[in-house]
Image (spheres, rainbow, N blue to C red):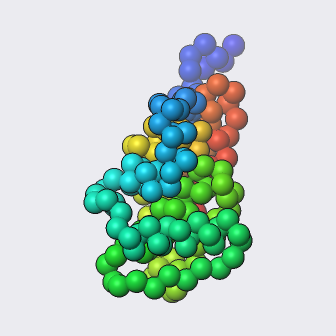
Amino acid sequence: MTRNSKNKTRADYRADGRKIARHKCADTKRRKRLEKEPEAWLRWYFAQAFPKPFGSVHREMLASARLAFSTGGKGVFVAPRGTGKTTLFQAYALMLLLTGEAPFPAYLPWDAKGVRKALRFWKNAVCFNDRIAADYPEYIDPFVCSKGSSQRCKVLLWADDGEPTGAELLI
């Protein structure tokens, strides 16, 4: 019998620290209700980004995005600076992914700076947005537990079966 056979080894303690529990949706009624209305979904889950009610330009942008995603078409929207075009389209792409409407929504910024900004927006949303984490734990839990660390995200295991979560942050 080895010295560590009765006691937990350091590796066991590290493995326990990598295990995360599966959670249930905090409010399935709210989630289903909001999924039916994209404007309400965006305003609830991104309350800091959309503190004011949507105006006509925002509704037009959302309608344009919905049309492009539902038909598989392309969309370009031109509006004055500071109207929230970028934030709205980034948040809407995440909504499509989380709700299952589009498993791979495409969002193509104009330049590399826009790509970095979009990736940062999504990383912050999946790692640090409490409202999304509460209602979409099946997708978000590993990212929340990783606290934005790509190294930690890769080694997380589900506590119930010990299987890898499969989550990766490549940002």
Q: Position of residue 4 (x, y in %)?
A: 60, 20
Q: Is residue 74 left or right of residue 123?
A: right
Q: How many numbered marks, from 0 up?
A: 0
Q: Position of residue 150 (x, y in %)?
A: 53, 56
Q: Quadrant of residue 14?
A: top right
Residue found at x 69% / y 13%: 1
Above or below, 46 relative to 4: below
Above or below, 146 relative to 109: above
Residue found at x 51% / y 62%: 92
Q: Along the line of sight, which residue is nearer the eye, 89 or 29? A: 29
Q: Is residue 10 visible?
A: no
Residue found at x 55% / y 47%: 36
Q: Position of residue 136 (x, y in %)?
A: 53, 41
Q: Along the line of sight, which residue is nearer the eye, 12 or 103? A: 103
Q: Residue furthest left?
A: 52
Residue found at x 67% / y 40%: 164
Q: Position of residue 132 (x, y in %)?
A: 46, 45
Q: Along the line of sight, which residue is nearer the eye, 119 or 11? A: 119
Q: Along the line of sight, which residue is nearer the eye, 10 or 54? A: 54
Q: Is residue 162 left or right of residue 147?
A: right
Q: Is residue 5 visible?
A: yes
